[in-house]
Image (cartoon, rainbow, N blue to C red):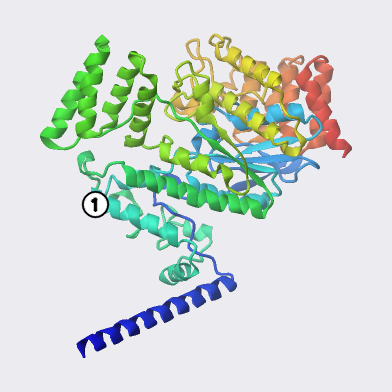
Amino acid sequence: MNGHLWRSLVQRFLIGALIAVLLLGLLELGLRLAGLEGRPDRTTTWFADHILHPPLVERKRVFAPRMNFYRPGQASRFRPLAAEAAKDAVRIAVLGGSAAHGYGVLGAGAFPLKLERQLQQLLPDREVRVVNFGTIAWSSQQLLWAARQLWELGEWDLIVLYSGHNELLELASWKTYLLPEQHRRLTRSLLLLQRLSGSRIVGALGRLLSPATAGLPATEVNAPGFPTGLVPGLDPVAVEPAHSLSELPALAPWQRGRMGHLEWHYAAQTFAHNIGQLIAEAQRHRTGVVLVNPAANDFQDPIGFSPEGTAGARLEQQLHVLQQQRAIGDSRGLEREARLLVEEFADPRAMFLLAGALLQHGAVEEARSWYLKARSFTEYPSRIIPAVSEQIRALADHPGVLGLVDVEASFRAQSSNGLIGYELIYDHCHPSVQGHELIALELLRALSSIGFVGLPRLSERDWEQRLGRWRAGLEQATPVGEHPDLRLWRYDGRPLVDGSRPYLSSLPGGFEALHRRLEERSIEPDFSAEDWLTLGNARFYRYDLEAALESYERALQLESGLCVALANRAYALRLAGAIEAGKAAIDRAVSCAPGNAEFLAEQRLLRAMLSR
């Protein structure tokens, strides 16, 4: 009797479960047919640098000459984009974080504009625009958000994605406020929400649970009631996100969670989840995607925190001993002690010192493996970790992906020992000017190999010549002279300081301070024609096109033979869509300097644009 009752209960349970599954399946199908979307694509936390502040672009009217242009991006130092594309123009959008943005230089120093110049040479009769949407601290969730707005600006021929550094930034920020077990629970909940993100039932429940804010426009969401721009209930975390740091107590470093396999898995899955949807969005618009696997600096010291108490004190003491061994050149002793320390603590600083010791006595391959492990375990994870690199390479065969450019492999190939140093990555993850040049070359080779918009295929000889010129530039002495290159399309903003050109990120106040000093000096009687040119370029990067054009005129008033002022004016006008005014300016520049090949190329392009 008991056995029969038990079997009856099991049967009823199974039938009930089957009916529930069928009903949920029908409900999911019905919601899909009704056009309901799944959960929002935000798959990380509330970290302030990652909060979205629409719009993706701002529209600005310029009255002299009268025109409209877009200012793309949410951070400073992007490029104007004409509101209406020229006929037969080639438009490429670059998405990424600060490494794509060109952190440390102005637009001309970053690879998007360098790629544009290379492509323009090969397509002289079609205007090529490679527009940089890279934004500091953006991860894949913001890139997906931005991609869904790109086509509001018009059609795009290609999306270039240079990303992967920032997938752990938000998650790492939570470690300041959560104990290790709490942090693991949060990470697992985020991974679960990623898996459920496509469910319309989950999406509907999310809307029901946050009816007051789900439909608010951005202007209301970012009002004073939401000081960080958060939408409570839409951020997929187990608890309501904090609106200010004071609402969460910061834990001591030794109390926080550590980077490990779960976090690496989270980063890789988040990237694949969001970038897969970004590629699908591009496919809906019949736009191809080129993925870039970025590089990081192997030689940048990682950050680590020691545990509390005697164990932490012993780790700190041993790290100090290792530093002393490195200082006196005892690589064998350093290797031996570092191995013991890594086995006991798995500390990234010990891994880094072990890698350096191995490199000193020629064990390059093993040294590289320890440099990569140190990068993974570092407590400031804004460097691309191996798990994300593997995911980027795995996406190369994804439908809609036209190609993969492995910058890490390229940078290693240019190194005598296969390790990436400061000559190509000037800090921990941001390419140097020379690094950006090589990225542009690699992208050019990839695009020519697939015949993008009819590009001729680069021969091996042509490629080697371009690479040879790049190597020669890498070996050049420190630039000299009072001013940087004043051609607007080559002006990267870096001033000459003590015989070298530091990156803007290392200057107090950066570009803003540089621009402010120029403005303050402009009232002085000794402000030269070249100073006015530099100020014009700075004003251009502040999106004050009228003031930039005025600066070029002031430069010409002081020195009528300063032909580059006319060329800069023509270039700026073309970018803003004033083709006829740009043509008049470049004609004057060619008359001023008849043999200048760059001026003649710009004149030919503007003539071709006007003839269509």
Q: Position of residue 397 (x, y in %)?
A: 58, 44
Note whether residue 260 is visible.
Answer: yes
Which quadrant would the N terminus be assigned to in this image?
bottom left
Residue lying at 77% horizontally and 36% vertically, measured from the top left: 454
Answer with left or right where residue 233 lies relative to residue 99. left
Which quadrant would the C terminus be assigned to in this image?
top right
Q: Residue furthest right?
A: 611
Q: In the image shown, does 5 or 148 lie closer to the viewer?
A: 5
> Which residue is tagged 1?
181
Note whether residue 247 is visible.
Answer: no
Q: In the image shown, does 168 or 145 lie closer to the viewer?
A: 168
In this picture, is 581 found above or below 498? below
In this picture, is 285 found above or below 294? below
Q: Amino acid at mark 1?
A: Glu
Q: How many numbered discs? A: 1
Q: Position of residue 367 (x, y in %)?
A: 35, 23
Q: Quadrant of residue 238?
A: bottom left
Q: In the image shown, does 498 or 360 lie closer to the viewer?
A: 360
Q: Quadrant of residue 165?
A: top left
Residue lying at 47% horizontally and 47% vertically, measured from the top left: 271
Q: Residue furthest left?
A: 310
Q: Say what secondary structure mark 1 lies in.
A: helix
Residue lying at 42% horizontally and 36% vertically, measured from the top left: 386
Badge 1, how many Cα within 10 Å: few under 14, some, many 20+?
Answer: few
Q: Position of residue 498 (x, y in %)?
A: 47, 11
Answer with left or right where residue 185 lies relative to residue 279. left
Q: Position of residue 140 (x, y in %)?
A: 49, 46
